[in-house]
Image (cartoon, grey):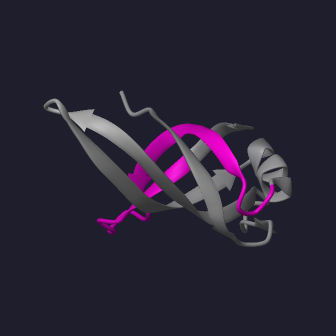
Amino acid sequence: MNQTQFVALIAEREMLRYTPAGLPIVNAVLQHRSQQMEAGIARLTEFEIAAVAAGEISSRFSQAALGGMYEFRGFLAKKSRNSKSLVFHIIDFRAV
């Protein structure tokens, strides 16, 4: 199963655009920071991840506040067929 959920802020976001097939899409960068427990020790976790909102969710995502904190749900996939880089695909999000 490939499901990911985390709270992050929208650090960067491109304008809504359309693929050659007419699919609306928005690319973004999300930033996460939290404290997690690992082996009984508190650990600060920070990451920045490329994200994409495609289809119906892209319109709502393009209206979300830049710098706003949201809980995101989605999945990870390679950026392209031959790439080793991952992109987070946003399925849903809500303000926190």
Residue 74 x, y percent position in the rendering = 54, 39
Residue interval drawn in magenta: 65-89
Looking at the image, residue 28 sits to the left or right of residue 33; the answer is: right
Residue at the spot 70% in from the left edge and 62% down from the top edge: 67
Residue at the spot 32% in from the left edge and 38% down from the top edge: 36
Q: Quadrant of residue 38?
A: top left
| Magenta span contains residue 73 | yes
For the C terminus, the image quarter is top right
| Magenta span contains residue 82 | yes
Question: Is 69 drawn above or below residue 29 in the view shown?
Answer: above
Of residues 61 and 70, the one nearer the viewer is: 70
Of residues 42 and 79, the one nearer the viewer is: 42
For the N terminus, the image quarter is top left
Residue 11 x, y percent position in the rendering = 63, 66
Looking at the image, residue 94 sits to the left or right of residue 37; the answer is: right
Of residues 29 and 90, the one nearer the viewer is: 29
Residue at the spot 41% in from the left edge and 51% down from the top edge: 77
Residue 92 x, y percent position in the rendering = 67, 36
Residue at the spot 16% in from the left edge and 30% down from the top edge: 40
Question: Is 96 drawn above or below residue 14 in the view shown?
Answer: above
Judged from this view, the residue extending furthest toward the left is 39
Q: Quadrant of residue 28?
A: bottom right
